[in-house]
Image: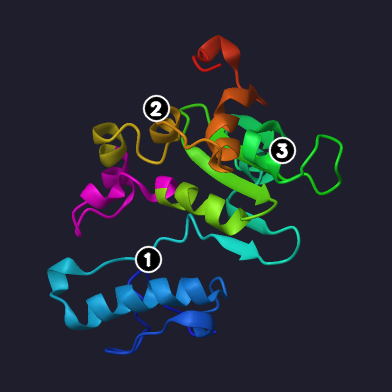
Amino acid sequence: WIKTNQYLETNKKNIWCIGDANGLYQFRHKANYEAEICVNNIFGPEEQKRSVDYSAVPWAIFTYPQVGHVGMTQAEAIEKGHEIYVAMKNYSTVAKGFAMGFENDDEDNGFFKLIVDKSYKILGAHIVGSHAAILLQPFVYLMNSGFTCSLPESHGEDNILKLERACPEAGSFMPIYNSMVIHPSLNEVTGWAIGNLKPINIKMENHEHHHN
């Protein structure tokens, strides 16, 4: 692979690398994302350079049923030391899913799984079922939310911590929790799953769960 830094630069001046060649997440949409950043960094002012962020790389498998994924799995989140809540909801539990023929005991009954930390920041979202890729995309946006107010020079852990204090809902599910969900639609599966959050390894004596 051709190694690059956070600006997609190689160790040779004025040589950049994107896509499969840099060995990071071999998806076409990842290459599209890198291409936009690379063009900005090649032709834009030095003080407006953008860095890549691979913390929320989504992917989908277009089989039947579809599979959609972004972020960590439950096992990965626990392994990395996060205290987490997990929510799950089946397609058959909402009107649109029932109208599409999904029933509770069906082998192909779709489902959505959400993993959040104790501050309700989204760590991962996973869908198996019809329209999984479409239903997953809003969670990709949420996982990247809040960071647009970061100045180009404000990269680094210290500045990200400052940004999280300034934007406490950055990356959280709260915009969904506070929003209406179109009825009847499969968005009710992902939107209402939050009501099913259950603590997995939360130290309850240090944290009160306010959502039902």
User: Residue pushed farthest top?
Assistant: 205
Q: Position of residue 43 (x, y in %)?
A: 18, 82
- Cα gap from disc 1 to disc 2, whole angstroms: 30 Å
- Mark 1 or mark 2, which has the lower sequence index? 1
Q: What stretch is highlighted in magenta?
A: 142-161
Q: In which quarter of the image is the C terminus?
A: top right
Q: Which of marks 2 and 3 is in front?
A: 3
- Mark 2 or mark 3, which has the lower sequence index? 3
Residue annotated with mark 3 = 98
Residue annotated with mark 2 = 178
Q: Which amino acid does label 1 sit on?
A: Val
Residue 71 visible in the shown view: yes
Q: Position of residue 146 (x, y in %)?
A: 30, 44
Point 26% across, 41% down: residue? 163
Q: Position of residue 101 (x, y in %)?
A: 76, 44
Instruction: Let me know if residue 148 is in the magenta part.
Output: yes
